[in-house]
Image: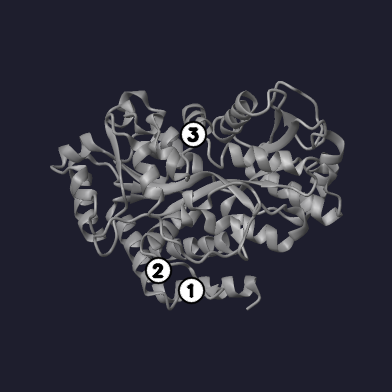
Amino acid sequence: MKRRVFAALLAGAMALSLAACGGGSDSSSGGGDSASGGDGHTLTLYAWDPNFNIPAMEAAGADYKENVDPDFNLEVIEQSASEDVETAITTAASAGDYSTLPDIVLFQDHYIQQYVSDYPDVWVPLDDVDVDWDNFAAEKLNFSTIDGVHYGMPVDGGTVICAYRVDLLEQAGHTIDELTGCTWDEFEQIALDVKEATGKYMMCMNSDGNDLVYMMLQAEGVSQFKDGKPYITDNETLVQVVDKIVKFVNEGICLLPNSWEDYTNTAIQGDQVAGVMNGNWIIPTIEAVPENSGKWEITSMPTFSGEEGYASNGGSSLYITANCQNVDLAKDFLAYTFGGSTVTYDNALKNGGVVTTYAPAGESAVYQEGVEYFNDQPIYADIAEMTTKVPIVEQSPYHYSARNYVGSAIINIINGADTASALKDAEDQLNFEMGN
């Protein structure tokens, strides 16, 4: 789920690649490299994860074909990563030639506002589709609704889960109930007890912990931006969050592995941790260790006040491009499937682990089922409910830049730098990048 920032040179190179091969390999049974369908029943779509969002797209295509249009064909064109979609948009817009784009693209939530701002002609608004937007989590729609206009159809949410090994908590004399609606100070004491009893870290985050900063802030209803400008040095909550992360690392209860692979493979799957705090898309990573089945459960986040905390980290939505050859079909497809079909959402969950932000889908029998790996807890129904409680905080096209600068400050503070100075440096760097 992490991304790299691409350079203009990459966009130029991608232009040649798209012209040569049509933008990607076709994962559908239909085959072919056409960027956009034109037969009245075919739509092309970019997605990037064959184990996650592509099965969700295929579930939607099958649902629409079976229940709406028997001649329908959804050609899912697999991209190697989410940034390939971003590069394709940049390339097409820079060249003023949208013919290389598919009808629909899956796009990361945290980037869409920047791309609508930079390339407004690429996107087809969805305000006239037959969808009850009130059924979607408000925080999710906050990304794809720009200047009051709906551009995206929500697919998956990144609602944060706190997953804990209940067997290790028990060894330390604690239960997951104690971690539900707890303060960060209470969390800290439980984590220290778990460390002493089991040797395990209570939480972990790759590299510099910048995901933790955002999640912990959002759970408090606070952003790294205020009125469009960086909100770091004067942000008392952010300073508290940074102080906690640094303290947790120094106490040996928070692990910061050096890479994403070390985070997923070594820390989580390598049995170094008793807890994982991240977007719910981390669940398949946790489940990859069969011998730990039945030992995990999930709950909400701690907060400074002790209220249950809710946040989101990641997620994506579907957008119709200016190259779409049948906008009416694309709109109807999105409205019927991800706009309201529990069949689509049930199969997206069963086949790809995609968790909806569409509230009615969370009430289906599939969502209510207990999950054996998580001690038969109905985690997906719980996540769907959590999603409705995630607070809206101010977003910015510089979202990831802010996280990276603050993450670097955290590492510097851990290594002995003064907190105020390190955060001032982060804010200065962000202001410079933003042209303030």
Tell me which residue sits at (46%, 64%) in the image.
Answer: 393
Question: Neighbour class for label 3 at 10 Å: few (<14), some, many (≥20)?
Answer: many
Please say whether residue 91 is visible from this viewpoint. yes
Q: Residues under labels 1 and 3: Cα distance?
A: 40 Å
> Closer to the N terminus: mark 2 or mark 3?
2
Left or right: 407 with respect to 47?
left
Q: Residue furthest left?
A: 173
1 vs 3, front mark: 3
Mark 3 or mark 1, which is nearer the start of the sequence?
1
Please tell me how many numbered marks the rendered image carries: 3
Q: Is residue 32 above or below residue 360?
A: above
Amino acid of disc 2: Leu
Taking the spot 24% from the left edge, 41% from the top edge, the residue there is 199
Report the side of 59 relative to 388 (left or right).
Answer: right
On residue 231, the disc is: 1
Q: Are marks 1 and 2 in contact (CB under 8 Å)?
A: yes
Q: Which residue is mark 2?
A: 238
Using a 10 Å C-alpha cutoff, classify the residue at mark 1 as few (fewer than 14 neighbours), some (14 to 19) or many (20 or more).
some
Judge by depth and name the residue closer to the eye, 259 or 149: 149
Question: In the structure shown, which secondary structural element does the residue marked by tag 2 occupy?
Answer: helix
Colour setting: one colour
| Residue assigned mark 3 | 342
Look at 53% across and 49% down and name the residue there.
132
Which residue type does callout 1 highlight? Tyr
Q: CA distance from mark 2 to mark 3?
A: 39 Å
**Image quarter (top left, top right, bottom left or bottom right) of the C terminus:** bottom right
Where residue 118 appears, as percent x and y from the top left, is 72, 62
Task: Estimate how packed mark 2 is, as few (under 14), some (14 to 19) or many (20 or more) residues with alpha carbons within 10 Å.
Answer: many
Residue 349 position, x and y percent, is: 47, 32
**Tag 3: residue type?**
Thr
> Residue drawn 82% across and 36% down?
22
Mark 1 in CB contact with mark 3 (< 8 angstroms):
no
